[in-house]
Image (tube, rainbow, N blue to C red):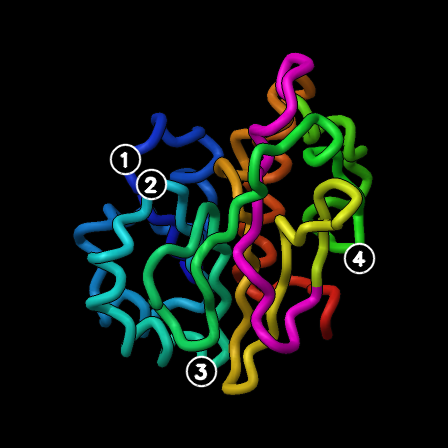
Amino acid sequence: MDVIWLNCGAEPLSPVIPTHPRVRVVDQFRLTAGDLGAVSGLVSGTLLDQDAMLVLRPALEAFLDRGGRWFFNGHFLRPMIAGIKPFRPIRQPRRADLSQTRLAPHPIFAGIEIAQLETNKGVAGFYGRGCNPLPEGAIPVTGLGEALVPVDWVWARPGGGRVFSHAGNDLDQLGREWNLGPLLQGRIIDWAGGGPCLCA
């Protein structure tokens, strides 16, 4: 098992996750430096306790430095690793500010129409309402509105490892009208485990 999927106390995990052969589910408050030293990928949800993760910053950075990958859902609020900046919301967003544009191809989204993720039962905004600002060298994957606010980006860190930031609700919980959850979960796991990435 080479990917840790943190159980951050959200909805019950999809059956796909704990039964996936590459995944080990770990309660976020039981995560240790040793856990991070034994895997190549980490997936965290929007309810991640960032104060608890901040305590593990040295281990998290060491995990990335040796080539690890972190799929991060939510808003960066604490400096859990060097180079990230706090979430920046879109001020008083209108519907047009929440429209999506694919800015770069990524295997996680291959074959998925933007319309399948842009709304939930016709309502926009669940996907994201702002961004975690791009670190230097990061590549925007999905933009919001005319300003192309980078709600999704991928970053090959100068010191090693990669971070995929999705600044919204857990990506694998979106696209429910098309039952995209299992597909997205599998692709997130594949990416976190070292699968293809747009910034090779």
- Tag of residue 65: 3
Q: Residues within 10 Å of mark 4 (few under 14, many from 20)?
A: some
For the residue marked with disc 2, what is the amino acid?
Answer: Leu
The tag earlier along the polypeptide, 1 or 2, is 1
Location of residue 98 in the rendering, given as x and y in whole percent from the top left corner: 68, 34
Instruction: Report which residue position mark 4 lands on.
Output: 104
Instruction: Report which residue position mark 2 lands on.
Output: 47
Marks 2 and 3, how far apart at CA: 25 Å
Which numbered disc, 3 or 4, marks the residue closer to the eye? 4
The tag earlier along the polypeptide, 2 or 4, is 2
Picture residue at 77% right of the left edge, 36% below the top: 112
Mark 3 and 4 residues: CB-CB less than 8 Å, in contact?
no
Which numbered disc, 4 or 1, marks the residue closer to the eye? 4
The tag earlier along the polypeptide, 3 or 1, is 1
Location of residue 110 in the rendering, given as x and y in whole percent from the top left corner: 78, 45
Which numbered disc, 2 or 3, marks the residue closer to the eye? 2
Location of residue 83 in the rendering, given as x and y in whole percent from the top left corner: 47, 75
> Residue 137: which quarter of the image?
bottom right
Nearer-the-camera pick, 43 or 1 = 43
The tag earlier along the polypeptide, 3 or 4, is 3
What range is drawn magenta here? 120-139
Judge from the rendering whether residue 110 lies leftward or rightward of residue 159; answer left or right.
right
Q: Compared to 158, does 7 lie above or below?
A: above
Q: Residues within 10 Å of mark 2 (few under 14, many from 20)?
A: some
Mark 1 and 2 residues: CB-CB less than 8 Å, in contact?
yes
- Tag of residue 9: 1
Element assignment for label 2: loop
